[in-house]
Image (cartoon, rainbow, N blue to C red):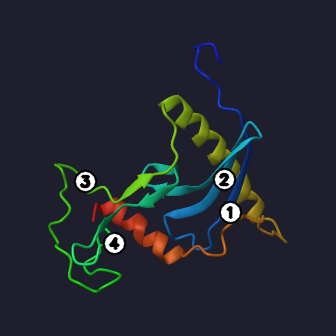
Amino acid sequence: MNRKGEKIVNITEVRVKLTEGKKNRLQAFCSITIDDDFVVRDLKVIEGHKGAFVSMPSRKLTDRCPKCGGKNHLMAQYCNDCGAKLNEKRVSRGGGRLKLHADTAHPINSHCREQIQEKVLTAYNEEVEKSKMPGYKPPKYEDMDDVDFEDLNEDLESEKTGM
């Protein structure tokens, strides 16, 4: 615990995989290891309007087709399984922005979020500096071969616009 009585998150490792396109908002994927015992993968470093921030791992929210019961992303216009047209008004905004994603892992309080963000952004900035050196070879990052960066950037745009 620190002087204020707040727990200190012991992040023992941060791995960073920079993305290719620097014009995209998605700058890097990261994983963190806590206490050498627990790994959280698929944190993202995103360039926001006020600078870089860390986005927690998330999944797209889905609903079921009324005709066949197949799962579809909330913004889908047609069912992925049977092709039926889906009701455009099936998702209510609830007075605010449309929520399209749900975190699969996240800190419980702002102090923990700040500690994770500080460690991840420090490692990210170090990796950016290393990438400028001649002969730079990006580190291996597990599960990166099946990532569709175009799909991810579309998701980021839809999060930004609430569409």
Pick the quarter of the image with the C terminus. bottom left
Q: Which residue lies under the disc numbered 2?
A: 31
Q: Are marks 2 and 3 in contact (CB under 8 Å)?
A: no
Q: Position of residue 73 (x, y in %)?
A: 34, 69
Q: Left of 3 or right of it: where is 156?
A: left
Q: Are marks 3 and 1 in contact (CB under 8 Å)?
A: no
Pick the quarter of the image with the N terminus. top right
Q: Are marks 4 and 3 in contact (CB under 8 Å)?
A: no
For marks 4 and 3 on the same chain, the one whose residue lies earlier in the sequence: 4
Give the Cα distance between marks 4 and 3. Answer: 19 Å
Q: Which mark is residue 72?
A: 4
- Please tell me whether mark 2 or mark 4 is closer to you in this view: 4
- Please tell me whether mark 4 or mark 3 is closer to you in this view: 4
Q: Left of 100 or right of it: where is 48?
A: right
- Please tell me whether mark 4 or mark 1 is closer to you in this view: 4
Give the Cα distance between marks 1 and 2. Answer: 9 Å
Name the residue type under label 1. Answer: Lys
Q: Which residue lies under the disc numbered 1?
A: 17
| Residue at 21 percent of width and 72 percent of height | 66
Q: Position of residue 10 (x, y in %)?
A: 70, 33
Relative height, residue 55 to residue 114 (above, below): below
Name the residue type under label 2. Answer: Ser
Q: Residue furthest bottom?
A: 83
Q: Which residue lies under the disc numbered 3?
A: 97
Quadrant of residue 83 in the image?
A: bottom left
For marks 2 and 4 on the same chain, the one whose residue lies earlier in the sequence: 2
Q: Are marks 2 and 4 in contact (CB under 8 Å)?
A: no
| Residue at 65 percent of width and 26 percent of height | 8
For marks 4 and 1 on the same chain, the one whose residue lies earlier in the sequence: 1
Give the Cα distance between marks 2 and 3. Answer: 28 Å
**Labels in figure, total:** 4
